Image (cartoon, helix red, strand yellow):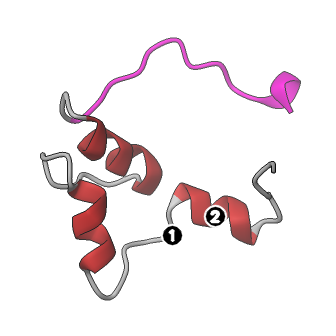
Amino acid sequence: MASSGTLFTHHYVQAPTCGSSRYALLTGTYGDPGNNALFKRAKRNPPSPVSMPEWFRTHGFKQSP
């Protein structure tokens, strides 16, 4: 998998907090600027577009034990 992957040499974040940066990375959209961005997203209905972890799950990828 590593040989067919992409190497990212620069990484830019939306805000200097891990929650909002993680939200942007996992959903491809901007979230709340605070650290609780993922929790706020989880409360919204209907859900946002498919997140990166959900895409991997639906395409057969599984978490290692």
13 inside magenta stretch: yes
Location of residue 22 in the rendering, given as x and y in whole percent from the top left corner: 37, 43
Who's the residue at 28% across and 69% down the image? Answer: 41
State whether residue 22 is above or below residue 36: above
Which picture quadrant has residue 18? top left
Q: Is residue 55 left or right of residue 65?
A: left
Per the rendering, the mark at residue 42 is none
Compare residues 49 and 32 and report the one nearer the observer: 32
Per the rendering, the mark at residue 55 is 2
Q: Does dot 1 land on a helix, a strand or a loop?
A: loop
Q: Does dot 2 land on a helix, a strand or a loop?
A: helix
Quadrant placement of the N terminus:
top right
| Dominant secondary structure (helix, strand or loop) of the stretch shown in magenta | loop
Query: What residue type is disc 1 on?
Result: Val
Q: Which residue is mark 1?
A: 50
Total tally of numbered discs in the picture:
2
Who's the residue at 28% across and 45% down the image? Answer: 19
62 inside magenta stretch: no
Q: Is residue 43 left or right of residue 26?
A: left
Q: Is residue 10 left or right of residue 61?
A: left
> Magenta stretch?
1-14
Location of residue 40 in the rendering, given as x and y in whole percent from the top left corner: 22, 67
State whether residue 29 is above or below residue 33: below
CA gap between label 1 and label 2 equals 6 Å
Query: What residue type is disc 2 on?
Result: Trp
State whether residue 17 is above or below residue 39: above
Label 2: how many Cα within 10 Å (few below 14, some 14–19, many 20+): few
Which picture quadrant has residue 20? top left
Marks 1,2: beta carbons within 8 A: yes
Who's the residue at 24% across and 51% down the image? Answer: 30
